[in-house]
Image (tube, rainbow, N blue to C red):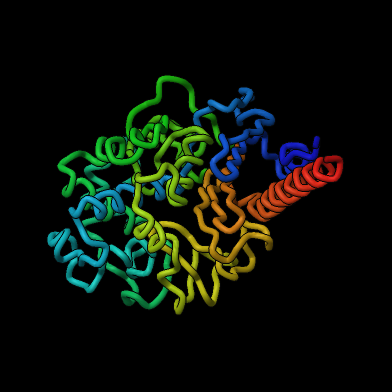
Amino acid sequence: MTDTWQARVSPILTEITNSSAVPGFVIAVARGIRPPEFLTQGADADGRQLSVDTLLPVASITKLATTLAILRLAAAGKLDLSDTLARQLPDARAAHYPVTLRELLSHSAGMPGDLAAKLAPYGPGLDWPALAQACLHTAPTRPVGARVHYSNVGIGLLAIVVERRSGRAFPEALSELVLDPLGIEGYLGGEPPRPVAKIAGDFGEHAGTAVEPVNSAFWRSLALPWGGLVTTADGALRLIRAFSGAPTGFISPVLLQEATSSQTTHLAGGYFPPLMWQRCDWGLGVEVRGAKAPHWTPPTASPSSFGHPGSSGCLAWADPDANIAWVMCGLRGFLSWWQTWANIGAAIFRARVSARYHVSRISYLVLRKT
């Protein structure tokens, strides 16, 4: 009974640290309705030891929270997922095209990946209202509904929809609609009350400055609805489990089934090479596993499994067939080590199967003795 997922995963993490210079990890696993289990190992980029309560910049896992806000508003009858932007945001440039909320959620609206630098110059003085205006001034750059093209801008437009339908600034709306009801310790736009783990890696021309992406207070102040959330591994796990129906009643089963089913079965696309696929399954705000290769989940993961990666080196994923969800946060940007993520997932899956076998074997022996 000592063959736990932690025992299987820990040596893999040590190897990743040695080969890819990832200084530390926080991993959370939830099986069925059981309480989550955790593994912490190593430190952040500043040498601070990691714990279950470590605050982490979870980058694009933020998109799960933004999507849940949209789904909550849909459940309340304040919008319809098939609404066009012309109905929801008539002042957006993209409203002149047949763009729907469903296409924004599935990254098939033809929106560019990021804002043009001239619309929102990166540096002191930038804030979420300025970024929101830049999103409103951005039009599709590809035919609508023709391809999956991963877009931060599309998520920004959805955040503006949340603001207008809720009557709250996006960070406040996110707390009221998602973070507070799920019991998540999360911060968007405001500085957390304790230190945030520093992520190792190359963050471009602003690395080491007061405006360094991911790691700086400036970055956190932007309240990016596509990548600015700071939370714990447990917080990220609660986000992905919400798409699996936990807690009951947070989102209706009918709406969750729609959200976690592929909306793009006939479309090619993806993130960037080599993470581009001839069939790029995507749900509403969550990537659907399908038959993608290469991928960050193990081959044993169900094609119907779903989740989202984050460029800060994290992944939140759920497999409804295996009744398991996991979050892994490594303290290095994902480009240098995402190829090893599937090994971590495979070890978690193998330990689950092994544990199930041991329980079944013990039950069998008990029955024989009686």
Q: Residue at x 25, y 35 (%)?
A: 172
User: 315 or 245, which is in the foreground?
Assistant: 245
Q: Compared to 19, does 146 lie above or below? A: below
**Quarter of the image containing the C terminus?**
top right
Count of numbered circles in the view? 0
Question: Does residue 249 appear left or right of residue 280 in this picture?
Answer: left
The percent coordinates of residue 60 (x first, y second) are 45, 48
- Visible in this render: residue 15? no
Question: Does residue 12 appear left or right of residue 111 in this picture?
Answer: right
User: 293 or 138, which is in the foreground?
Assistant: 293
Q: Residue at x 50, y 53 (%)?
A: 308
Q: Compared to 94, does 232 lie above or below? A: above
**Quarter of the image containing the N terminus?**
top right
Q: Residue at x 15, y 66 (%)?
A: 86
Question: Does residue 244 appear left or right of residue 23 in this picture?
Answer: left
Q: Report the residue that reaches farthest toward the right.
A: 369
Q: Report the residue that reaches farthest toward the top.
A: 193
The percent coordinates of residue 140 (x first, y second) are 29, 69
Q: Residue at x 73, y 43 (%)?
A: 16
- Visible in this render: residue 63? yes
The percent coordinates of residue 119 (x first, y second) are 26, 53
The percent coordinates of residue 44 (x first, y second) are 61, 30
